Amino acid sequence: KPTRHLTDQLTLRFGCRSFSVDPDRGFLLNGIPYPLRGVSRHQDREGVGNALTPRMHREDMELIKELGANSIRLAHYQHHQYFYDLCDEYGMVVWAEIPYITCHMDTGRENTLSQMRELIVQNHHHASICFWAVSNEVTVGGVTDQVLENNQALHALCKKLDPGRLTAMACAFMLPDDSPMLQITDLVSYNHYFGWYHGEMEDCDAWFDDFREKHPGLPMGLSEYGAEAVTKWQTARPQRGDYTEQYQALYHEHMLEMIQKR
């Protein structure tokens, strides 16, 4: 009889937990409300692009943990397997997504489906991942039949490959709150920059209150917000668009309060 030899071995970690999203109670982990406070993370460093070393990945995670974050949006593509492992180890709640962003290409549908399939097949064992996100701000060019069909196909693929997880999408701030896009995934989030690109920071409070009144049964998240700053620029009279550290700090303080109240 031929002798059998082990030639290859792969060890994968997994975890057991339950999670759900309720429009009134928010995100629930193992049946208990668990408010998500996190960051969007890009796999990128000056001088190395996205070819980060394990030390750099762990530095990113340590910074995120130091902030007090308990969730991470991995924008807008697959990240290194080592970082998914770190998300598991640090107990993060993770939103993973594909690079289907900003501009829909009619010839790119099969590419988006392929990337979603690879994302799920390669990472479904990571207990930290709770959301598969199908797109980011892909309606900037308008909501066409092709955009709707592509997102519907991605949602269906997620449910076929991994029915236990939730699907999500990040919507551009200009997407109307009655758009059929909002009916595709299990939950939706908006990227809002009131107080930076347009309007005042207080407008964000009013927008979410208005959305909640119109759609009380739809789970809603805030997937992006922000104000840019140059840390060496300082002022005693911060105002929108001045790029000072003071305005950015005031902006964060207001948004954190806005999120906490809702």
Image (tube, rainbow, N blue to C red):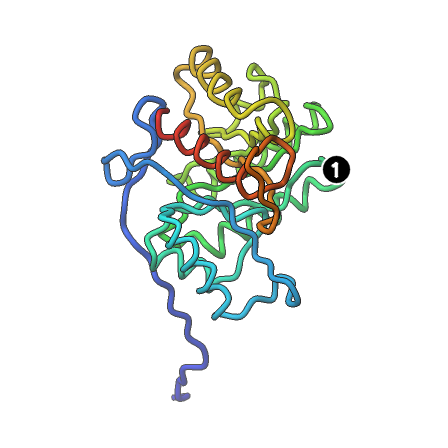
Image quadrant where one finds the C terminus: top left
Residue 8 location (% of width, % of height): 45, 77
- Residue 189 or residue 224, whichever sits in front: 224
Residue located at (29% from left, 37% from top): 34
- Residue 27 or residue 241, whichever sits in front: 241
Query: Would you name the residue on which mark 1 appears?
Result: 105
Q: What secondary structure is found at the residue carrying circle 1?
A: loop
Residue 3 location (% of width, % of height): 39, 88
6 in relation to 262, above or below? below
| Quadrant hosting residue 153 | top right
Q: Amino acid at mark 1?
A: Met
232 in relation to 177, above or below? below
- Residue 171 or residue 41, whichever sits in front: 41
Image quadrant where one finds the N terminus: bottom left
Residue 108 location (% of width, % of height): 72, 42
On screen, residue 57 versus residue 217, left or right, reads right
- Residue 219 or residue 161, whichever sits in front: 219
Q: Can you name the residue that lies furthest to the top here?
A: 214
